[in-house]
Image (tube, coloured by chain):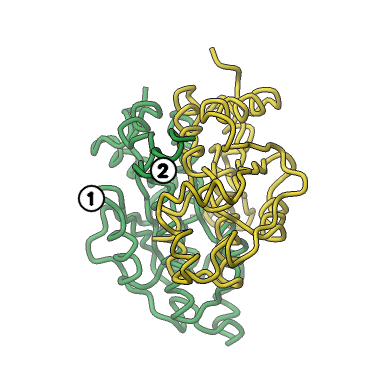
Chain colours: A yellow, B green
Amino acid sequence: MANLKSKHVVWHPGAVTKADRETITGHKACTIWMTGLPASGKSTLAVALEKELWDRGVHAYVLDGDNIRHGLNKDLGFSPEDRNENIRRIGEVAKLFTSAGVVNVTAFISPYRADRDQARKIMSDGEFIEVFVDCPVEVCEQRDPKGHYKKARAGEIPEFTGISAPYEPPLNPEIVIHTDREAEAQSVATILSYLEVKGYVPPAR
Amino acid sequence: MANLKSKHVVWHPGAVTKADRETITGHKACTIWMTGLPASGKSTLAVALEKELWDRGVHAYVLDGDNIRHGLNKDLGFSPEDRNENIRRIGEVAKLFTSAGVVNVTAFISPYRADRDQARKIMSDGEFIEVFVDCPVEVCEQRDPKGHYKKARAGEIPEFTGISAPYEPPLNPEIVIHTDREAEAQSVATILSYLEVKGYVPPAR
């Protein structure tokens, strides 16, 4: 018990270090933060990237609307304040995953520059990789897989990014992807190449 | 582009399945949910368990006050409503980690039975393992590593669990640990044995 007590007094922030995690997993951890208009292709790309990373033995995980909006952030709407809190929480969760040794891929519109910069700010240098999924709004609107653009045009969805709410493109993203003029495999390859060159993951065998 | 569009229409919940993750990591994912009084030894035990799991090649991660209260939940206090929201969010994050293939260890007082049961409810069968870190309040108060019990007795910390706020012990926890009468190594061994017998992790080599 004396032993337990002394361990409490000398607080240890975790016996497993970042270096331990990298050695055991064989790769560095980071957050690959995708941002872009609705239907720009963020989630599709994130899922394809996750698959490719796992195939290489990299522990990857996607955070997107599907597992966040129905769970952690189900209490939030789409007002500017709620969007801000939405992204704040996602940034904190992404930080936890990065701290856990995971290559975390987030796929959210995250329309405000300040919110994305805040997510970057809470992480260590090099841990936050911003990927601008760039696609003209006309192309996104033509895709409209969930019919959201149509409803937004009809006024049925208020504050819809790209139509009735602003989207602030990144000024200095680490990576830019053009989903209107490149195949999914090419976009995945671009991101993987970045991760390899920068030493996050080992080259493909 | 047609390809991308069709991929959007046919929504895929993630190309990497739970079975894929188990095959690649070599273990099952779960949340080991520790609950108990302040200074009962939750964090100390969680960190020791995490270390042992990593030494065995199991991808483990601890969520505790240190990485949650200063980040994701820094907007929350200690009122019953805020404690409820605190545990709700932690449960959702634990679910994400479990879904990501990680053995997630949470170390929070989590005083209310209903909150813990809610965290259990949002996971799949067998994914939530409740560990009651049982220690008499007198022993916890004697340890008092952060001086919180002393301040609570002096009325400087309101709503302090065990002194001026309730703690509801689990009725049917999967595991009970007695930190007042067993060594840390023994407590770790008890939990590891449970994980081995139930097939979450392979036996130690």
**Label drawn at residue B46:** none
Q: Position of residue A70 (x, y in %)?
A: 39, 60
Q: Which residue is mark 2?
A: B8
Q: Is residue B144 visible in the rendered structure shown here?
A: no
Regarding residue A116, the answer to whether it shows in the image is yes
The part of the image, by quadrant, that contains residue A195 is top right
Q: Nearer the viewer, mark 1 or mark 2?
A: 2
Going by the image, does A200 lie left or right of B205?
right
C-alpha gap between disc 1 and disc 2: 30 Å
Secondary-structure class at tag 1 = loop
User: For residue B149, which quarter of the picture?
Assistant: bottom right
Which residue bears the numbered disc 1? B125
Which residue is the extreme one toward the top?
A205
Please tell me which residue is depicted at 67% across the width and 43% down the height of the picture: A130
Same-chain status of marks 1 and 2: yes
- CA neighbours of label 1 inside 10 A, class few (<14), some (14 to 19), many (20+): few
Toward the viewer: B190 or A92?
A92
Q: Give neighbour class at mark 2: few <14, some 14-19, many 20+ (Cα, 10 Å).
A: some
Q: Quick one: A59 or A129, which is closer to the camera?
A: A129
Please report, as a chain letter, where disc 1 is located.
Answer: B
Compared with B196, B23 (above or below) is above
| Rendered view: B23 above or below B155 | above
Q: Foreground: A45 or A114?
A: A45
Tag 1 and tag 2, C-beta contact below 8 Å: no
